[in-house]
Every structure is written in structure tokens, then in C-alpha cells.
Image: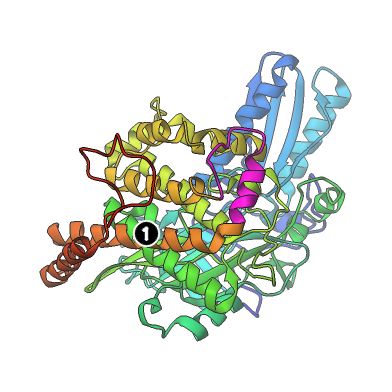
Amino acid sequence: MDNEPESYAFYGVDHNYPNTSECGMFPLDSSVESHTTPAPHVVAVVEMGESHEELFHEMQRLAVRTARVYSNQHNRRFVWGLTVAGSYIHAYVFGPDVLWTSNEINMASASGRQEFTSLLVDWSLCSVDCLGFDPSIRYAFDDNVGGPYLEIDIHEVDESVTQRCVGAATNLVGCHARYFAASTSLESMDNPSVLIRDVWLPSESDPGGDKSSILDVLHAALEGTGDLKGRFSQIASAGSVYLCQGNTLVKDTTTTAFPGLAAASQHISGSQFRHHRRTVTEWAVNMISAADDPNKVIIAIADAMTAHNAAYAKCKILHGNISDRAIQFQETADGVSGVLGEFDYASFVGDSGTAKIELPDQMLFQSIRRLENAKAPCTRLDDWESLLYVICVLGAIGFSQKERDEFAADISGYRSVKSWNTHRARNASREKCTQMSKIYFASFIYSNVRQKQLRRLAMDIHKALFLHEGCTGELWCKNALDELTLRDTFEDEVVAELLSVVGRHKQEALVELGTKGSISTVVAKEIADSSRKRKRNAVPTTTPMTTRSKAKRSAPEV
């Protein structure tokens, strides 16, 4: 993208992007006579109420609908909105971290009607890239394809095309990460060759680079090491997204998207500089949320967390953002294997073994300690705790369409998992403290996680994380943070136990998949034989079942 892009088809209409004279609340286009924006592009989300007292509820509904816009329109950069409360109107721009609003416009007064008319005129004449759409992601149509498809510009790579988004933006604020299965031609679109990730990443200033350097370190040090081959995502290309403003290509950031508004909001708490980036990885992986079998999820988790531990032990790199998108899986002739990706928040650890990692946007999977104190150092146990929440969420959503429909319909029993998905960190922390405590966890897990395999794995991980010498599991008390801090002194022992847990469950999952024909019969037999041999040689850790209830807690007899 070194040269200015030419005109291209966008919903069947050709556009040359005109010069932007300014980009404030109402950005104007100086070349009005050449402005050819089709009416369907001038879109705002509108909520209406009968009285001024309904304004707050209208803003809440507006936020919910705007989040759906981000989820369904994969080329959305930002969204315009309007609320009408009686005779009063407010205009809004939803940025990645900040909601900008106009002054209150009273339609009962002549000055208010004049101001609103000016707003509509300015809005209709603004430059195309100020309407909220991403000009580097374009919808197009082709009769031979059988429906609309997307054309996506890739940094230093030929234009890619895609017919499906495999991961939509799910939040109102934040990085708005999207994933596209893509190819470089219409003819090969049914067989994607790359996975494109589009994301708005936070930083103090434009870094000019990305976390691909961390992946380079991991690949150089670990990729050829035994079982770690193929365990880290392969980035083919990474770079900034560019916009054409006048005759100049500029990086797409919150500053270039909202120059006037961004400068005015620098003092706002929570407002961050964000840069729009796009990465391309080889199309060989799937998100674990797309798995059709819980055993595949377990295998992916074991492989990814083994890679996570190796990255820390051998390269002093901490991932810092374990989520349902960071853990991926691939299916080949050799079977199912896991991949660790999403290194946007990864960091090299210091001498203390911890890292200062910015709290990611998604609260759903964050650890209790990081929700309570976003500036707290991140440890391996925070990532493992995030993994526990990933398992609980996947187990609640389910793997069949019926299960997912029930979850989407908010069937009673799954609301406790949904309560984590909030932008109020303290609320999410309080919910997790209660549900992870030793007296509530069993009822929580049985009422939320459907599959017995994931339920057993979650209970074993919970036991290793919260029920040991360094943590009593009394998290509902005020000393929850003290409990978690004390746990850090046993970090190595806890991580070793966690790796043992996921390794054991992986072996069982491989056997299950073998009986279903997903791995070869020979491999399944070898795994089963190994499992039986391990059980025969195991040292008993409990007294016999008939006398266990009467036995005192003492060292086991061999």
C-alpha cells in the first residue's frame, strides 16, 4: 500500500476518497461537488422516547444496538447515534474507548431546529471515511460467487477476498477484533489460505511495529523443539491499516479517525490511543469456540498451555491474555493439535518472574486479581485462571446448535457465566470471587457447564488453583487478594500440577476421539495401553473406599 489506492467497487458504486478538510463532530468534505456517497452509507443508530426523562434508558438501548452494529457490520470503524427524548436530541459518536456527544438540541426552539438542520447537512456532506466504515474492507458482489463477499486490503500483500467472518467484534468498546477466512482470488474463496485478524490495539503512542517480534523469538527458540512444533501461530504478514486522505496515505489511528475529538478527550479517564492493525496467519487453525467436540477443546488447551509454559520457561515471555481466541486448534491427518496465538499483550518478564501487562478489553476471562487491580503484575497463574474461565464459558455455550440457542436465549442457570461479561471490572471480580470460592464452585460448575469432560477438567484446574496450601478458596471474604498473593509463593508447584492435569485429560480425550474415528486406531490403542500401564503402576493416594470415611487425614499407606 505504498501508492494511493485507485477507485474501487463498494456496494457497486465507484469512489475516489476526497480530501478531508476536518474531522470534528461534524466533519465536512471540501470537495462537495465530487461527493458521491450513496444514501445507505449515511447511517446512525436512533433511539426515541416520549419524554426527556427517558434519555438515560434511551442511551442504554443505543449502546446495546451499537454493539450489535459492530458485531454484524464487519467493516465498521466507529458508529454514529442519535437519541430523541421528547423534544430534545443528542448526537453521538462511539469511539473505541470514548463516547462523544453533542450539546442538547431543543427542537421546540428555532435555534435548536436550525442547529439540528445544520447537523444533518454537515453529516450528509462529510467525507466518506468519516461515516464510520473502513474503506480497506469493502463489500462486493459477483453472480458467480452466489452472494456478497468482502475485499480486504492487506499490508504489503495482494488484496484478499473472503466470504465469511469467522470471528466478529463482540464488544461495544475495546479492540473490536475480527477474524476472516480469506484467499487471494474469487476462484479459491471456498478454500481459504489465510486467516486475517483485524484489530484496534491500545498503546501510549504509535509503536510502528507489533508483537510479531515476540513470535519471532518463540519460533527461533522453540519451533524445532519436539512437541512444540506448530504450537505457536505463524504470522505471514503484519502491519498498520492505512487510509487515503487527500493524496497521502496515513496510518489509521484514533488520532487520524477523530483528530478534533481525540485531542479533546486526552484527559478523559479510560481513553487510549489505539492503532488499527491487520495480521495474516496461515489458514490451518480454528478457534476453539468453533469446535464440535469437547475432546478437541481439551486437546487444544493442553497443547496451547504446554506452549505457554515453554515460552515462559525458555524465553521469559508471558502471554498475558488467555481467551477463547488465543487458544486454537488444527486438524490434520495426524489428528487434532492445539496452537497458542494472540500475542498482542505478551511481554518479556522481569527478574521477579512477572510482567507489567495492560489489562485487555475483554473482562470475561480476566483473573480476579487483575480485575481488582489493573496495574498488578501479571503471573502465569493469572493466565491459568483465565483458562478456567474459558472452559466454563465454552461449557456453558455448548457444542450443538440447540445448546447454543438455549444459551443465547438466556436460559436460567447460565446467567452466572454471562455476569462476567461486563465493562465494570469490580462487578466481574465480585461475581468470580463468589463463584470460585470453595463452597459455591461445585454448584456453579454443575449448573453452568454441560459437558462432563469439561466439567471434570474445570474442577481439577480449580482445585489446583484455589484449593492448596497457598490458597484456601475463601475468596468471598475481604481477604481474597491476600489469598491470591500468598498463592504466588507456590507458583512453580501449582503450574506443575496444572500441566499434569491438562496432560492427563488430553490423554483421555485422545482415547475418546479414537473411539469416534478422529484419530488412527493404532494411536488410540497406544494411548489406551499407556493409560492402563500408568494406572497399574500408580501409588495409591487414598485409603480403600470401605474405610475412607473413618480414616484420619494422614500420610497414605503404600
- Kind of residue at badge 1: Val
Quarter holding residue 57? top right
Residue toward you, 44 or 247 = 44
Quadrant that contains the N terminus: bottom right
Residue at (35% x, 49% y) in the render: 457
Quarter holding residue 198? bottom right
Residue toward you, 8 or 330 = 330
Quadrant that contains the C terminus: bottom left
Quarter holding residue 429? top right
Measuring from the top left, give residue 319's x and y in whole percent.
56, 65
Magenta region: which residues? 470-488
Measuring from the top left, give residue 54's x and y in whole percent.
69, 17
The reply to whether residue 14 is visible in this rendering is: no
Q: Residues within 10 Å of mark 1 (few under 14, many from 20)?
A: many
Residue toward you, 554 or 439 = 554
According to the picture, the residue beneath numbered tag 1 turns out to be 502
Left or right position of 271 against 49:
right
Q: Secondary structure at mark 1?
A: helix
Q: Is residue 506 magenta?
A: no
